[in-house]
Image (tube, rainbow, N blue to C red):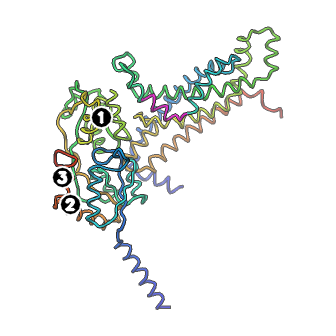
Amino acid sequence: MKKTLVAMIGAIALSTTAVEAKDWEVVRLAVDVPYEPFEYKAPDGSLTGFEIDLGNAVCEEMKVKCEWVIQAWDGIIPGLLARKYDAIFSSMSINEERAKKVLFSEAYYNTPTGFFGPQASAVDPAKPDTLKGLRVGVQRGTIQDTYATDNYSKVADIKRYTTGDDLVVDLHGGRLDVVVIDFPVGVSTILEVEKGAEFKVLGDNVQLGEGVGVAARKRDGQLIEMFNKALATVKANGTYDKINDKYFEYSIKK
Amino acid sequence: MYETIENLLANNDIFTLTTVLGYWDGLVMTVQLVFLSLILGLILAVPLAILRASDNVLVSRSVWLFTYVFRGTPLLIQLYIIYYGVTYIEGIQESMFWPIVREAFYPCLLAFVLNTAAYTTEIFRGAIVATPRGEIEAAKAYGMSDAKAMTRIILPSALRRALPAYSNEVIFMLHASSIASIVTIIDLTGAARDVYAKYYAPFEAFTFAALIYLCVTFLLVFGFKQWEKRWHRHLRPLS
């Protein structure tokens, strides 16, 4: 009897250590598509973009197989917690609120936030008074949403959108006066398109947040460690710079 | 269940005064939107139902086409087409309609009105067609013209009989209005989405909104029941 008990305890102890030291063979990564140029679909339907290339390079470094899972932004954290995938690799800015729910890796890039509006606009984002009575569009739940709400909600009307696409369509359609969005995303979706010539960058960009990191469930500290190590390697060995130069004219390395 | 409610109440991180006021504003917006849609839809639906029940095939078929299109496509798609579609009309931004169309509220209202008008038209048409022959013959025997028979005999009786089916449409409309939040309108669902995005608490945010919808639905069901009691007195069996 005693022996069985000891054996059982031993077995339980063994199995718990086995869980802790889980060998990751496949890591499922969530992305919100499209978010050009970070992740979007090529004409043939395949996923491409800065984060897709970087993610694949990091996975190669970690010697795991990575599977990309497409998930809409507003459900991306609940989806992680519900184990639909193992990590979020989708331009998620590190912030305090999110850190309560998920575990972040070191930042792997940081981009400025930009302000976009029609050519005739006289808005200066640094002076909230110039936004008086205007409609300011943001993507709901982003750090830009928080920034616009904190700075402009007293003078302007903040419109929150579910996807970045809807936001851009409404700026092009004339429903919005100002769009606050991640700068590179704004450049490629607002300015570098057919109607782009009618719009411009307003004022100076601002740096929000602590940069973008990989997010995983709190219990998967080991996975985050793996990401940190692999990210440090690709940043140091030139792989990161190569991917950076493929998509951007400037460095977004952090 | 009790634990859930206790959790909801104890979690003061989320249900602060600002949040609750946000829900209140959302409720006001939902009620406004649904009420206006239903009233305008009703005003459209009565004449359309008369035309739809007409013996003239051309008239009846053209109204049928309208109801078929709006009942045959999802409301969400109709909302997208109207909301985004209007901005593509040439010269709309310079026209006098732009200040109205620019607001998310009016394109959304238009989509809701047309949709509920289509459903209500078919409900009323059914009731008009089902008017007992005897009532119509009696009206004719009294020497009433077709128009007079319609306004005095057929419509009053048909609209009363349509009440239970119409009450369903009202409740469907209330629930369908939750898609208004897609086009930046902060209705009840929009308020819940804001809370969800701010606190990453989908369960609490949407459960609270669902409870409010339940309360409004309860009021509607209760109201219609009273109304039916009054208007259907003549249909109740003698006990």
Residue B96 rendering spot, x and y as whole percentages: 37, 15
Q: Amino acid at mark 1?
A: Ser
Dots 1 and 2 on the same chain = yes
Q: Secondary structure at mark 2?
A: helix
Element on which disc 3 rests = loop
Q: Is residue B78 magenta?
A: yes
First-in-chain label (1 vs 2): 1
Q: Are marks 1 and 3 in contact (CB under 8 Å)?
A: no
Q: Is residue B138 left or right of residue B6?
A: right
| Quarter of the image with the C terminus of chain B in it | top right
A177 vs B14, nearest the viewer: A177
Quadrant position of the N terminus of chain B in the picture? bottom right
Tell which tag, 1 or 3, sits nearer the viewer.
3
Marks 3 and 2: same chain? Answer: yes
Q: Cβ–Cβ below 8 Å for labels 1 and 2? A: no
Say which label, 3 or 2, has the lower sequence index.
2
In the image as oriented, which residue stretches furthest toward the front?
A: A44
Query: What label sits on residue B104 in the rendered view?
Result: none
Q: Amino acid at mark 2?
A: Val
Q: Residues within 10 Å of mark 1 (few under 14, many from 20)?
A: some
The dominant secondary structure in magenta is helix
Amino acid type indicated by mark 3:
Lys
Residue where numbered disc 3 is placed: A253
